Amino acid sequence: MNKPILSLSTEASYLKRSVMRDLLSLATAPDILSLAGGLPASEFLPLQQYQQCLNDVLNREGSRAMQYSPQSAPLREWIAGYMRARGVDCDESQVFLTNGAQQGLTILSRLLLDPGETAVIEAATFTGIQQITAGRGARVLTVPTDLQTGVDLDALEAAFSQRPRFAVIIPDFHNPLGVSLSAEKRQRIAELAARYAVPVIEDDPYSALRFEGDQLPPIKAYDEAGYVFYLGSFSKMLAPSARLGWIVAPSELIPKIVVMRESIDLESSILTQQAVYEFVSHGLLEAHLTNFNRENRQRRDALLSALDEHVGGIASWTQPQGGLFVWVTLPEGVDTWAMFEQAVAEKVIYIPGAAFTIDGTQRNAMRLNFSNTRPELLREAVRRLADVIHTQFAFER
Amino acid sequence: MNKPILSLSTEASYLKRSVMRDLLSLATAPDILSLAGGLPASEFLPLQQYQQCLNDVLNREGSRAMQYSPQSAPLREWIAGYMRARGVDCDESQVFLTNGAQQGLTILSRLLLDPGETAVIEAATFTGIQQITAGRGARVLTVPTDLQTGVDLDALEAAFSQRPRFAVIIPDFHNPLGVSLSAEKRQRIAELAARYAVPVIEDDPYSALRFEGDQLPPIKAYDEAGYVFYLGSFSKMLAPSARLGWIVAPSELIPKIVVMRESIDLESSILTQQAVYEFVSHGLLEAHLTNFNRENRQRRDALLSALDEHVGGIASWTQPQGGLFVWVTLPEGVDTWAMFEQAVAEKVIYIPGAAFTIDGTQRNAMRLNFSNTRPELLREAVRRLADVIHTQFAFER
């Protein structure tokens, strides 16, 4: 068969291979300890309960649960109530269900931004946020993020003064940094959005995974002017394979969101929507999260104490109060990208910090995931990692 | 709360409200007989078997079926075998799973077409195909479709000579026309694609729904040069809420498709993928389709004989050998859009032909769905519809 050279769109030329996927694919040996992923702990997902919910829906709804369907009104109402309990003044007319938070990012990026226009993202951020900005040909302004209090507001305001089309900010248990925004900053961001008329996309897949400290209202709770779009997800708080998330948007934008979503992939599975509603409306979410977060906390503790023991003298790291990730900063000169191969040889992997930047900086940092590895294996993983780091560190000195 | 006027992207300005949704939302009274939808028959969806497959997967895979996951290799292999059995020379490296065929259309449109560039579609076609061409700001060339043999090849070649970025063609049981491409035309289309170097997107959600005549190979089976992209879907042949379809593409394009999909919504549910694989690999699909298509045939027969009885003198219609739809052409001057309100008053609805065109033509045609209404109700629906048509016809004369 001849291979034609099909010429691709400009949009296709912006897309970059995911370096994270490349790195993860390098390391598939069964005895490798991976701190590289972003998965919730498989063994604590609510398997029996979710299976029961699926069966209850199919037994009750029959083949209607296999059909095309409008979005589940009860689930949208439940989400509106959940958001109100977090301080967001909204009703179900502002809630739109998506195929996970990433689809929310896609829809909002396409509604608000043309290629060549300006978007603001955090300097170190989730690769999916890079994809819906740089990966669509946006001019990207980056703002640094303080490792104790979240995104730098002076830098954010300076970026807003350039009238970008939107900014994307992760409020809780930042991916990859593990930091959460202070309450003061949340309010200030909503104010800055209104003052500069810059839409803020608040990407919040993690806030339900708090295991320490007080829950804070989302930025959206302070949004009196209607410039904040909130993205939530059931992927981390219930099950990734549910493929279900939501947008809270000003209701006048919902019709455009509906048409955009319809053009992309019509709709989300009504079976999944109803099963998730069954789960949350029977109070199973609270019980699951209590258990889940207790385990996550033990894993975070195991990771942090192992870091303290093995690299306490030369590295620093964030202190996440929830979520999945810790961000480790090594001395200048250590290159976590270059040392990845050695780490694979030592049977431990992580994601190099540079993968979370669009300019390849943060080379002396790494993201460690604590949620999907048992505590004793976390300690072993850090021991191996410390060997690699110490070799590098000695070499650099 | 103040309502800010958020300025939207150029892309958002291309998006149009779905007139089909508007029409369907007009007609929700419980006693309305709807020939307007595009749903497979709920009562013949394989509920118990699919539920068993979901449970088998969850019982066997446990919480792995709730996690993030690479695409199911067994399902991709099964699909490659299914395509080979239909005459397509392919392996699993060319198969990519999507959230239904609409997502396949989205991915390919974005990979191949920039706004302002030219795309070719059939003059009467599925609204989702309008959305990924006109709805993305493409310059759209339309080609007529013969109601016996499918798309007009002279018109298609003339359009190809303008070097469009791609053409979208529905090969079997066309939506909305109900017609299938002749075998000769399938081969010629693949040849034209190669000669003019124009990618052809073959949108085929319906071919498994054949209840009469011989199955024909898809256009892709004649694609020696690698210019044909095939889109399949489990939505109509198994369950819409599975939200699962596939692309067969040249393998060198798969990496770009992977990144594009990842940026849109990461992935499809692994639970659904495995349940669908369970279903097809246990031979349940053949049994389901045998039953399903027998019922669909009875419904088509009921619809066509009712048309013959009630509007035989003044209308003509297509003779679908499968699928979901019949296309009815009324005398010039009858306006199926204008008479919709009267049809609602008579408690029967359909989709006016103009909804399937981007220029508002086909005003004297309508699409009727036969798959989701019982035979006796189909007859009653046509009786009501005939009353409306006769009123119009008398008025026009």
Image (cartoon, coloured by chain):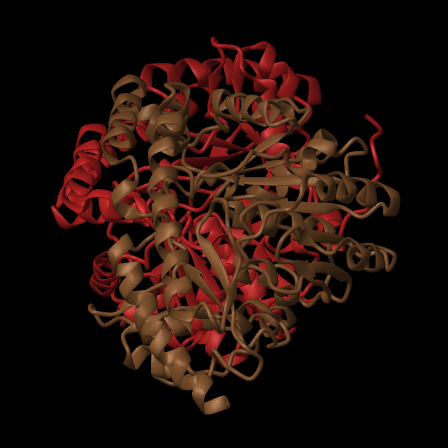
Chain colours: A brown, B red
Residue A341 located left or right of residue B87: right
In this rendering, the answer to whether B147 lies above or below A34 is above
Of A182 and A207, nearer the camera is A182
- Compared to residue A247, the image places residue B92 above or below, namely below
Which corner quadrant of the image does residue A331 belong to? bottom right
Q: Residue B103's spot in the image, x, y percent?
A: 48, 52
In the image, is residue A256 above or below residue B221? above
Report x, y in % for residue B164.
62, 70
Q: Quadrant of residue A86?
A: top right
In this rendering, position of residue B3 left or right of residue A231: right
- Find residue A110 and report its horizontal and vertical position in percent: 67, 53
Residue A15 showing in the rendered view: yes
- The quadrant of the rendering that contains the N terminus of chain B is top right
Q: Residue at x 46, y 55 (%)?
A: A325
Q: Residue at x 42, y 70 (%)?
A: A311
* Residue at the (40%, 51%) spot, across then down: A300
Q: Foreground: A27 or B128?
A: A27
Whether residue B155 sits left or right of residue B183 in the image: it is: right
Quarter of the rendering occupied by the C terminus of chain B: top right
